Amino acid sequence: MNNSYNYLLEHNVKPSMQRMSIMKYLLTHKNHPTADDIYNELSKRMPTLSKTTVYNTLKILSDSKACLALTLDEKNIHYDGDTSLHGHFLCKDCNKIIDIPLNEISLLRNESSEFTVDSVEISFYGYCSNCEKKRI
């Protein structure tokens, strides 16, 4: 839990057992879980954990930029513990979300720009290789 403790402090989030557990989950699970996914997994080990606590914690974490809140589909918000610059690919068949590495975008570092970039969301949609094979 020490990693998640320090990570929360770095993002000015007051650590608690629930927050550290949720942050640790996000940092160690790269599957872009929903709040319900996180609740269902963590409640097995933390029976007193409530859905409200998970939702509130995820709001705090995303507001403090400790995680990303992804709105890739109309139904769910997915969360990503990797806050580095990268895109996401959503398979339109199986709904799997895959990280897409990006080269640094020079425009974001342009100090003479007329705007300040606070966040970037780059999304790709299509079919993963497994689903594409099924379609043919």
Image (cartoon, rainbow, N blue to C red):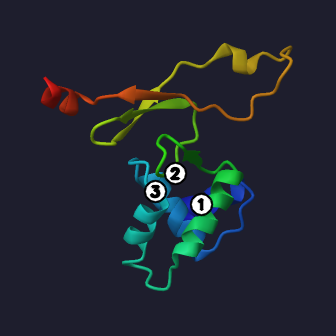
Horizontal side of residue 118 vs 21, given as left or right: right
For the residues bearing labels 2 and 1, Cβ distance under 8 angstroms: yes
The residue drawn where x is 54% and y is 18% is 103
Relative to residue 108, is residue 54 depicted above or below?
below
Sequence-wise first label, 3 or 1: 3
Q: Name the residue under label 2.
A: 77
* Mark 1 Cα-neighbour bin, 10 Å: few <14, some 14–19, many ≥20: many
Q: In this view, does 1 lie above or below 10?
A: below
Q: Which amino acid does label 3 sit on?
A: Thr
Q: Which mark, residue 34?
A: 3
Expressed as whole percent of the image width and height from the top left, the position of residue 105 reads: 63, 17
- Give the percent coordinates (x, y) of residue 15: 66, 69
Please give left or right for residue 120 compared with residue 126 in the image. Answer: right
Disc on res. 58: 1
Between 127 and 27, the residue placed more toward the observer is 127
Which residue type carries mark 1?
Leu
What's the residue at 71%, 21% (across, down)? 108
Crowd tier of the residue under label 2, counting other residues whose Cα lies within 10 Å: few below 14, some 14–19, many 20 or above: some
Q: Which one is in front, 110 or 121?
A: 121
